[in-house]
Amino acid sequence: MGMPKRLVTVDLEKCVGCGLCTLACSRRFGFAGNDYSGILSVSLSGFERGATVIFCRGCEDPPCVQVCPTNALKKRRGGGVIYRESICIGCKNCIQACTIGAIFERSDGKISVCVHCGYCVNFCPHGVLAMKEVKA
Amino acid sequence: MKILKIDLNDYSYEIEERDENWVGGTGLAVKLLREELDPKVDPLSEGNVIVLAVGPFTPAYPMASKTVAMFKSPLTGNLGESHAGGRTAFAIANAGYRAIVIKGKSHKPIYVVIENEKVHFRDARVIWGIADSLVIARIIAEREKGRGMRTVMRIGGAGERLVRYACVTTETYRHFGRLGLGAVFGSKNLLALVVIGRGGFKVKDPKLYKDVYKEIYDLALRSDAMKKYHLIGTPVNVKPLNTMRALPTRNLTSTTFEDADNVSGEAFAEHSLGRRIACSHCPIACIHLATLRLPYEEEPYFYRTIMISYDYELIYSLGSMLGVGSREGILRLIHKVESLGLDAMSTGVCLAWATEALKRGLINESNTIVKLEFGDVDNYIRAIEYIYEQPNEFYKILAQGVEKASDVYGGKEFALSFGGNEMPGYHAGYATHIGYLIGLRHSHLDNAGYSLDQKIDSYPEPEEIVDELVREECWRQVLSSLVVCFFARGVYKPEIVSKAFKPLGYDVSEDELIDTGERIYKEKLKLKVDMGFKKPRIPERILETECMHGKLDRDYIERALEYWWKKYCK
């Protein structure tokens, strides 16, 4: 098995706040919008200070996994989580547990979280996001 | 499609689900205004109606990043249409709506928060009266949730005080700028509208959707279609317009500006550009922010540093038009206009007229309070504050626009407005001005005149120019119904638009698109005529000052106007 990869920011200062990553993430699920997005583009208290992105930073010991009562969130090799939607009961414990607010509520009550697939990287026009090999 | 209707009279709302063949954006807004608005209503009365509409491509495709606002304009007394970027379209579409309709008038100052299917009415009495729209926005942003999923559309002091060219600002730097939507908000005691959206829609064919998306994305980034906006941004126009004698200067007494190089897009980029940001769902990031570092007046080694958004039209209206040839001067003027929530173009043209009227003795310094002189930045800044404060009769009138001011004080021949709206920054030739006169939005973006003038060596019959302008304008009704940014019109050709509809589950041929554009054009024009649209006045000044094609002849423009009136308005 090769080295696992993880979504990282190369240079956050370059983010222009276009939100194409957010839209790419939902598009992966055949959805136009942000409902399924596990990455959020935000301004830094107003666009005069620029913009940034919020997504799972791939904790080695993720608190969200610990508080999940159904094992819908499991540790992922290389950091972060795997999300099994079918057994998620929508308790939102994980949303509370994530210090950086990187787990989001969907309109159907379940959650969206970055699983480090890297699809958004193809649509980041300004080189903010990249996939990086990490030790398992 | 879902339409949210909010009534401020009794703080109620309803969500309507309906099928509609008016697409979205402009087309849908015309339809909704037709249903909801009495065309004869006073624009600052509670009977005025605001429609905010997005389209079938929001939030599906890149550069479908604009929202269309439609209302009755307090500046012109006719149809008001204004488009803005920022996060507004993204938030409205994700909240699940194709359009939002706002009716009635709150009896106390409020702001409204839309959170998907819920609407909250919030007391705004404490923050009413704050002149600076940037401060209002920060307070609301800190109180409300939805970071990254929301838009904060708000007015500043100018909107509260009903300046008829007050704007609505969204995400600090984008505007429903023209035609006075800010005053309509103010007249309804509506300080701000926040929309928080989490949602969107499932597409019909996900595989095809991803492919078409990629094609459009690549076209935007890898072709030359949007290059102009990629790099220097819209101010790239300053130098060429100056060279071709099309840059309106000092109230259009000249079309070349000796300081053009100082205030060119290139100079701003080299010396002032501090950051670029994007509207939601746009890879181009054409919003250019300048850094302005200003010392404290009385204390050494103290500075404040401000980020200020600049574009071509602002460099024209607050720069060349006022004879201001320094970047710092222009940026300070932009910042003043931005914080009070005024339309920069109307403000600049009003002040240019006032400067000339003062020089000619039509008005005196007891009217203007400060001595207005081309190039005097400090006095212009004070005058802008007076437009907001309206401390005397003169400024009360100037706050109603240059058409009104010249009705009262004279100087009509150099009052540069078209259909009551202050002139955009191009004096390129016949097509430009005919475009202003017959444009349905009465804003420069609405016609292809300026680019036609650059291509033409010798002019055809005026009828030909009119038909060409109308053809392009009909197509732009389609673009503004989808709603895609006009800067992306080089990408969204009929073939691509038709193709992009497929994965969303619609079969729309190129011919149908063209027909739709014509249908919307006609319907919009009909609404304008019902609102009392009359053949607009031709300002003398545009005939006196030479452009790249020499002096323009009144007869040619009259013939064009007459032909358009008979063929399209009757």
Image (cartoon, coloured by chain):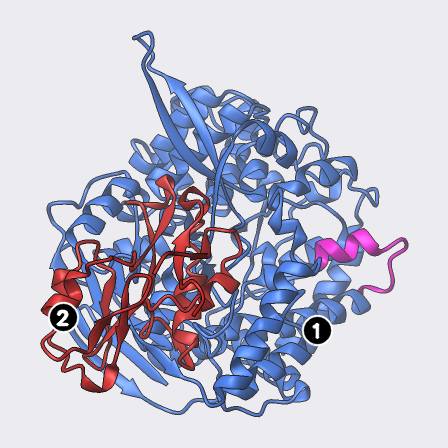
Residue B21 in percent (x, y) is at 48, 89
Quadrant occupied by the N terminus of chain B? bottom left
Identify residue for label 1.
Answer: B471
Residue B71 in view (yes/no)? no
Please state if B215 lies on the left or on the right of A35 as rendered: right
Please state if A48 lies on the left or on the right of B356 as rendered: left
Residue A24: say if magenta.
Answer: no
Farthest front residue in view: A1
In the picture shown, does residue A20 fall above or below B235?
below
**Secondary structure type for disc 1:** helix
Q: Colour of chain A?
A: red
Circle number at residue B11: 2
Quadrant occupied by the C terminus of chain B? bottom right
Q: CA distance from mark 1 to mark 2?
A: 43 Å
- Report the residue at 44% width, 73% height from top: B58
Q: Quadrant of residue A7?
A: bottom left
Farthest right residue in view: B458
**Near-viewer residue (B325 or B267):** B267
Residue stretch rendered in magenta on the structure: B449-462
Q: Colour of chain B?
A: blue
Amino acid type of the residue tagged 2 in the rendering: Tyr
**Near-viewer residue (B481 or B139):** B139
Chain letter for the residue marked with disc 1 in the picture: B
- Report the residue at 75% width, 71% height from top: B467
**Near-viewer residue (B354 or B376):** B376
Amino acid type of the residue tagged 1 in the rendering: Arg
In the picture shown, does residue B385 fall above or below B503?
above
Residue B342 in view (yes/no)? yes
Residue B214 in percent (x, y) is at 58, 72
Chain letter for the residue marked with disc 2 in the picture: B
